[in-house]
Image (tube, rainbow, N blue to C red):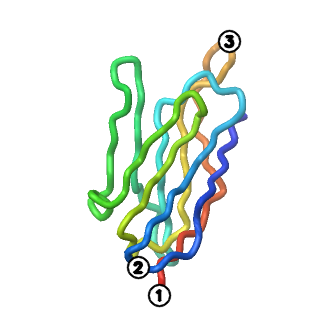
Amino acid sequence: QVQLVESGGGLVQPGGSLRLSCAASGSIFSINTMGWHRQAPGKQRELVAAITSSITSSGSTNYADSVKGRFTISRDNAKHTAYLQMNSLKPEDTAVYYCNAEGTLRTVTHARFSSWGQGTQVTVSS
């Protein structure tokens, strides 16, 4: 009932930048957490960054140590969209990047949901 569509991946040289977008659509009442995960060939999927909004917090963020200071996650609540600005990219950032969103549905019971996007490839290479 909730679909996520990622965009913005591609090929970039080391030291370059990319901006990923993740747009959620469907029967959404609210989205609490939006996050970016990545999976490189032969490795497990790992959390890259997440941003959580609540009544008391406009957007607390969490980053993997490997991307702190280089990546920035943000969101537009009105558009149900999250962004990942990636600067100073390194070859080890090469992976498929997946967006995840968790929240509640626009139903009588406000059932919770957790949805994933299809992934977007990021390749950092000279």
User: Whole-percent x and y of residue 77?
Assistant: 53, 30
Q: Where residue 2 appears, x then y in whole percent?
A: 68, 36
Point 37% across, 32% down: residue: 59
Q: Name the residue nearer the viewer: 40 or 55.
A: 55
Q: CA distance from mark 1 to mark 3?
A: 52 Å
* The N terminus lies in quadrant: top right
**Upstream in sequence: badge 2 or badge 3:** 2
Instruction: Please say if 88 is above or below 4.
Output: below
Please give the residue where the numbered disc 1 appears in the rendered image.
Answer: 126
In the rendered structure, the answer to whether residue 108 lies left or right of residue 90 reads right
Other-residue count near label 1 (Cα within 10 Å), few / some / many at <14 / 14–19 / ≥20: few
Q: Secondary structure at mark 1?
A: loop
The numbered disc on residue 14 is 2
Q: What is the distance, in whole Å, between disc 1 and disc 2 at their CAs?
A: 6 Å
Cβ–Cβ under 8 Å for marks 1 and 2: yes
Q: Nearer the viewer, residue 14 or 121?
A: 14
View extreme (front): residue: 16
Q: CA distance from mark 2 to mark 3?
A: 49 Å
